Amino acid sequence: MTTAPNAFSSYPDARGMFGEYGGRFVAETLMPNILALEKAYAAYRDKPEFTEPFEELSRDFIGRPSPLYFAERLTEEFGGAKIWFKRDELNHTGAHKINNCLGQVLLARLMGKTRIIAETGAGQHGVATATVAARFGIPCEVFMGAHDVERQSPNVFRMKLLGAKVHAVTSGRGTLKDAMNEALRDWVTNPDDTFYVIGTVAGPHPYPAMVRDFQSVIGREARAQMLGRIGRLPDAAVACIGGGSNAMGLFHPFLEDESVRLIGVEAAGKGVDTPDHAASLNGGKPGILHGNKTYLLQDDDGQIVEGHSISAGLDYPGIGPEHAFLHDVGRAEYRHATDAEALEMFQICSKLEGIIPALEPAHALARVRDLAKELGKDGVILMNMCGRGDKDVFSVAKALGVEL
């Protein structure tokens, strides 16, 4: 492993850079919004008026701490290391996304913002944002690619039921990248009253670090739970990666624990040797998108190439800049799993553990199977079960040719 120039906890620097990645590459018209957000986050993050409602609602509204669960039958099936799930799919709204949404909406209130916007892919971030906005009575609008609106219709209805207005974005392929483009355009147009809740560890500084901080509750809890349950840390911590918020939330509290391998699993779609994948680290190169420098899927002219995944939450054509940094310095490993492997794991986990995973963590399970054999029976694997599969049952049935 290449050693990072400073302790991992020192990143990002004052410019929002993780080594050569990150930063703040935005139009001049957005800079006042970004600088105001950075100032507010620094001012309130440790103040009682923020921390007290955040901790109370994390417990009573979200349902934290989420359980640590020994997947006994999958451990037996894979024939190797013991597999433990950090069960963030049991959070209110069914995924890890609400950890971050609660923090950002509380910050928006302290800043006096009266309108919330968000982008969403699989719909989980949109649902979580709409849920917290409903809790505080703040109008909410969500931008979602038209293609994702079609394949994630249950979450579209949930957002509308929660009082949010959903904008179906038809530009591009109508997926997450396009939804984020439209949300940024809206924010430029409505800078005074609007707060943009970004759902992943990407975007201009301070979003990558701020979202990571809110999601790091996953890793902090899991670290303490593993020490309490089995008296040791895991040999590996594994999570799926699109933009990378659930993975960064799991990884960050383990960054200084060199004995713990950190393994992210990207969406390989139809294969990384085809054009139809969303594996930015395995098949991309550095560039700038949505206000930060990171690894992106792009052509020889630097034009962004659309990502593909059966999972609406993993088809973003980039990755959070901190993941790009961890990749380059060798602190984390980044593997990939295909659509077919995710569908297989979706079914296996459901049948063996009685847990229907979202398609996103089903990708991670595909590499957990390999890793279990690699580590052997004395090994311990911690995987973030970051979302439940209710939202995916119709699209999975369609993919498998099952008539409902």
Image (cartoon, rainbow, N blue to C red):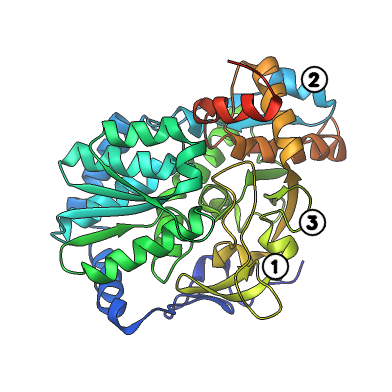
Q: Residues within 10 Å of mark 1 (few under 14, many from 20)?
A: many
As helix, strand or loop, the secondary structure at mark 3 comes to: loop
Q: Residue 14 in the image: x percent, y percent?
A: 42, 79
Residue 4 image offset from top left, x and y in percent: 65, 73
Q: CA distance from mark 2 to mark 1?
A: 36 Å
Quick one: quadrant of the N terminus?
A: bottom right
- Between 49 and 297, the one lying in front of the other is 297
Kind of residue indicated by mark 1: Gly
Question: 223 left or right of 236?
Answer: left
In space, the residues marked 3 and 2 are separated at their CA atoms by 34 Å
Rate crowding at label 2 as few (under 14), some (14 to 19) or many (20 or more) other CA atoms within 10 Å. some
Q: Amino acid at mark 3?
A: Thr
Mark drawn on residue 274:
3
- The disc at residue 284 is 1
Can residue 324 be seen in the rendering of this structure?
yes
> Is residue 218 toward the left or the right of residue 256 in the image?
left
Give the mark, 3 or 1, whose residue is nearer the N terminus: 3
Relative to 404, is 399 above or below? below
- Sequence-wise, which precedes: disc 3 or disc 2? 2
Amino acid at pointer 2:
Glu
Give the residue at x 50% y 27%: 67
